Structures are given as structure tokens and as C-alpha cells.
Amino acid sequence: MAIEGSRFTRRKEDFECANCRRDIKGNGYTNHCPHCLWSRHVDISPGDRQSSCRGLMEPIGSVYEGGGYIIVQRCQSCDHLWRNKASRRDSTEAILALMGKPVPWNKLCASPIHLPPRARN
Ligand SMILES: [Zn+2]
Ligand SMILES: [Zn+2]
């Protein structure tokens, strides 16, 4: 697994992006790739890493909300929809490229456990 990234101390949250194959340094808050915004379906609730799905999460849209960007991802294996708060290191270009894409918001609202923590209640 460690090919180019072996010069780094690999922590638990570090990963290789399954889509663009870049080595990503995890920061403990996000598990999506800051370059292409893909990730893996590893959480049931945000951050818990309890999902056994491990499918690829494809970014399908983005929205500007509450002072930050939200990336909407869909799992290619189980079709789960996920709202992912963009982090500051994410590629703004990639986020903007997703703006205006059709997102099935009605389905998204039916899965409240995937709302980012600050948006609960
Ligand atoms: Zn990537
Ligand atoms: Zn999944």
C-alpha cells in the first residue's frame, strides 16, 4: 500500500485516494480526497468508521451553506447519499465544478444521520 508515501509516518487516518491514487494525509476530521473529493464509505455516523461497506463515494454535487461548502457524495456500492462538509484544504475548483449538478435532495433528507454534526436538530 505504501509506495510513494513511505517517507511519511503513516497514521491511522492516512490513506491512498481510491480514485486519483494520491496519498492523502488524514487530519482526523475528513476522509475524503482534497483533490478529487472522492472517499470511501467507512462511516455509519460521521467519523465512526463503523460501516463495512467500503464502497467508493462519488462526489455528485455541492452546495454553499451556512458559510461553507457541503459536498454531496453517493456510494457506488450501496447508493447511500452523504453530505460531507468541505474542509479548507479541499480543491475549490473541484467543489465549484460540482455546483449546480442535480442532487436528489429528497432522498438526502431521508438520511439524517449523514448530516454534518453542526446541522443536527
Ligand atoms: Zn483523489
Ligand atoms: Zn456504501
Image: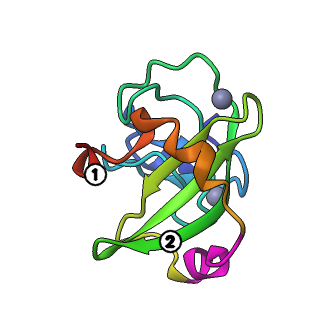
- Could you tell me residue 72's position as x and y percent? 57, 56
- The dominant secondary structure in magenta is helix
Residue projecting furthest to the right: 76
Residue at the spot 32% in from the left edge and 50% down from the top edge: 27
Residue at the spot 56% in from the left edge and 74% down from the top edge: 95
Callout 2: SS: strand
* 94 falls in the magenta region: yes
Residue projecting furthest to the front: 106
Dots 1, 2 in contact, CB < 8 A: no
- Could you tell me residue 38's position as x and y percent? 63, 53
Figure check: 82 above or below 12: below
Instruction: Please identify the quadrant where the N terminus is shown.
Output: top right
Q: Is residue 120 left or right of residue 61?
A: left
Q: Which residue range is magenta in the image? A: 93-101
Q: Which residue is mark 1?
A: 119
Q: How is the image coloured?
A: rainbow
Residue at the spot 51% in from the left edge and 64% down from the top edge: 34
Whether residue 4 appears in this view of the structure is no
